[in-house]
Each structure stands twice: as structure tokens, then as C-alpha cells.
Image (spheres, rainbow, N blue to C red):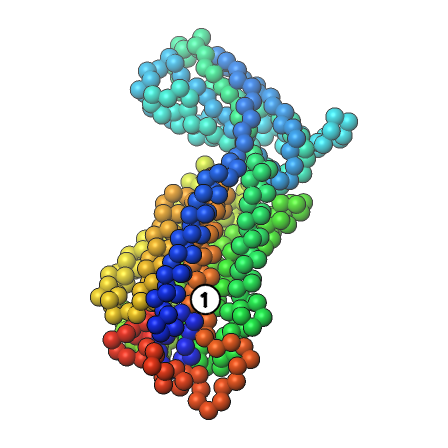
Amino acid sequence: MESPHFAPVRIEQGQKSKRTVYILSAVSALVFIVACVIGATGPQVFRSKEGNVITVAVNENATLHSLIRDLSPENQLIFVAVEVEHPTMLSDDVELEYDQHFRIDYVDGYDCDDCDRHRIVEDRQVTKRVRCPANKQFCNEVVIFSEHYLDYERYDLGITLSNPIPVVDSDCAGDSVQVKLSIDYINREYTRFELGFKYTFLFFSLLALLLPEYGYLWSLLAVPTNEWSFNQKWVLALGVLLVFYNDPFFAASIYKENGLDFSVAHVTFLTIFFCAVMLFWLCIFERMAAGVPDSTWSAQIGFWMPKTVLIGFLGITTISLFVLIRTNMEEDASFEGIDDIDNYPAEVSIIATCTTIYAVWLLTLLFRTCNKFRKLSIEYQFIFCYTLVVILFTIAGILTGAMYPLPSTPIEFLVFYAVFNSYILTLMYAYTPAARVGDKYEGESVAMAHVSSPVHRGSVEQLTLDGDMI
């Protein structure tokens, strides 16, 4: 395993190790392929409803109305957006940017024709930055109303657009532009799709962790805690966090009235999970680069402090930013997190800086560990390569926005959940002690039995992810 001073682990099976690696590789690839196929054929995340489209003269006011019907908590949220036509009196290759004033006249929520109406918003002024790219018919849409946790089946709204295209010269007052309203909301079928797979992943993560006698936790408890390796302790922590990563409170956030607390809890656990994984990678690759056996490694403050501070700043800032955005959404129905992210330059700068420092640090450690790879036994070469693949997936997810709590496509949701669940469950399998709960250790300890075994990994030439390497 990692050091002859620790109990042997399940992935170390002597002559069977190569077959175990092939099986784990095939299973991981199969999980990924199945997730891609199911995700690609899954229901779309958003459904759209076109509101009314009107033609309005420049420098005049325009009023738009829309009624949204047949909503339920499974639709999760609605976004109401406005698009203004690129002014035809200007050349198509002119790029335009300006502040547009809106007034949300009213938003009423109710359940039936004879039911009481509940006024959600009334006479609220909103200013949005509108960007009109060159050579496009319409400017970028701006969200002027959003509602999470849909408590009503119907939403009736009226919006006034004040002085469209205010930057156009008054000589063009006779010209006109089109203004259209659009409503986007989560597809119920997607919500059920997400609900089903999140709880499927949750079931398997709990099973792998807590299954009596065979679960990772039970198997670890069969071994004295002083024989738990550095990686085994880490994988136990990641296994517990994986349970919360799989969003056990997702149903409550949908069906409970105003499930803001559950939504904040989900993002908090999501952030903690990713921060823990990132910290795990820094730790194992630094230990691999140092080439110090696990048995002689002392976890000094100099080892933990810089990593914990960096990841802590990143995690706390991310959670704080989400809480600020969601609080503003609750207080201001026109606030939209993505469009209004510029309102938080300090938080965005901290996140960008911490992410950059982390990326440089991790790449440096990976470069330093390249010469150690050939010395690894095949089972730990597999874990090393699997970790690199997951790191690449994480980078791709951050760059494409697929790590956002609300993905834009079902394949993004399913593939990333499948990859991280498969990765952590594979680590749990790999680092499970070979002995099962209930086995009696008589005479030699498990560690000593491992030393005397002809397949132990105690030599200098066969480094492992938990001994001389990670």
C-alpha cells in the first residue's frame, strides 16, 4: 500500500492487482459513457415562453404584459427578460452600450381565477446595462424579474420600458424598435430527472460508506486507528462530504415553502466538498514530490497553514458571494446573479486570485512529481492518472460554467456528478483495508502481516500514493 507500517488495502492484491486496475478502469469509463448518453438524451433544463412583442417609437414609453400559467414548485424558478432591437437608424456594425430604465408596475401571484391575488412587486424602478453587439438584430437580453420557490400556479406581470434607446439622438424620435418579453423557467421533467439521479448517487455513496461489514467506514473501524494511513483518513473525510455533495436536502429545497435555507446549505456543502478535494490534491502531490514515507511524515503547521489559508479564503469568499447574491435576489426581484456579478468586484477578485495561485501551485507540484510516476506500482499509477483526469474535468467545469449550482444542460449535471461520485467511490474501494470487520488479529498485527507478505510494497523502488509518494 503506502507504507509497510500500515494495513494492506483492497487494491493491493499482488498478482491480481493488474486485473483489478483493468476492472476499475472499465467501470469508470462505463459510468462516464452512460452518464454522457443519458445526459445527452435527458430533458432540457429550461423551458421558454415568448411574451408579447411590441413596436415602440424611440424616446417613448412601452408597456408589456404577460401571464404565466400552470407553474408548480417543480419549476423551481422563473426569469423574466426583455430584449430591445438594435436601433435600425444606426449602422448594423455599430456596437452600443447604455443604461435602460424599467419600471415593474406589478407582479401578482395567484392559483386560480377566483383566488385572491398576492402582490409580489409593485411600482419598482430598475436600471439595467444593455449591450447591443454589432451585426445582431437584438441587444442582449436583460433579466428584470426573477422568482425562486414558486408558491403560485400563475404569475401576472406588467412592465414599462422608459424611453427605449435613450442614447439615440432626438432627431430619430420618429423611428421605432421592437421590444419583446421572454419568460424562462425550469422544466418539470428536468427537476424530476435531477431529483432521481441526485438521490441515486446519494444512495450509493451512503451504501459505500456505511454498509455493515463491507462499507468503507466499517472496514476502517476494523483496523486500529493508529494504523490508518494519511490517505485513508483523507478518503474517509471525502466520503462523508460526498454524501452532502449529492444534495440530500434537494427535495426540501423544492417542495418546502421558501427553501432558501436548504439552497444555501447545498451551496455551502458543495463548496466545502470541492475545497476539500482541492486541499487533498495539494497534500498528496506535495507529499509525493517530497518523497517522504507516510510513517515518518510529521504534519507540521508549515505543511497545513498555507494550504488551509488559501483554500479557506476561496471557500469562505465563494459561500459569502452566493449568500449575498441570494439575499439580493430575495430583496430585489430584478436582481440576477450572473448579470449583476459586477456588483461584487472584491469577492470576484479574491476568488480569481485564489484560483490562480492554486492552479500555479498544483501545476508546480505535478511537474515535480513527473519523475516519480514510473516508480509507482500499477495500482497507484491508475489512481494517479484517475486523479489527473478529474483535475482536468474540474478545470473544464470551472472554465465552462458547468460547476454552477444550476447547470444549463442535463449532460453537464449528470457527467460532473457521475465523475466525482465515481472518483471518490473508487478511492474508497482502493483504500479500504483488505481485512473485514470481525476479523481477529492474533499474533502479528495486520501491518506486520503485510510486511511479511511476499506482495508488500515496502521497497524503495515501488513507491505508492500513500507512502514515499503521496
Q: Which residue is farthest left?
A: 371
Up-down relation of residue 158 to residue 175 (above or below): below
Q: Is residue 110 rendered to the left or right of residue 250?
A: right
* Residue 397 against residue 376 in the figure, above or below: above
Taking the spot 47% from the left edge, 30% from the top edge, the residue there is 142
- Tag 1: amino acid: Tyr
Q: Residue at x 40, y 80 (%)?
A: 6
Q: Give how far across and how far down residue 309 sits, in percent.
A: 39, 63
Disc 1 target residue: 429
Residue farthest to the top, as pictured: 174
Residue 242, horizontal then vertical, whole percent: 50, 59
Q: Which residue sits at x=66%, y=45%? A: 255
Looking at the rendering, which quadrant does residue 140 occupy?
top left
Q: Secondary structure at mark 1?
A: helix
Count of marks overlaid on the render:
1
Q: Quadrant of the N terminus?
A: bottom left
Q: Percent from the top left, x then y, of residue 213?
A: 56, 73
The residue positioned 53% from the left and 68% from the top of the image is 215
**Is residue 280 positioned above or below 167 on the image?**
below
Relative placement, left or right, of 87 versus 207 is: left
Residue 422 visible, this angle: yes
Residue 224: image location, x then y, percent:
49, 82
Q: Is residue 308 shown to the viewer in this render? A: no
Mark 1 nearby-residue class (10 Å; few <14, some 14–19, many ≥20):
many
Q: Quadrant of the C terminus?
A: bottom left
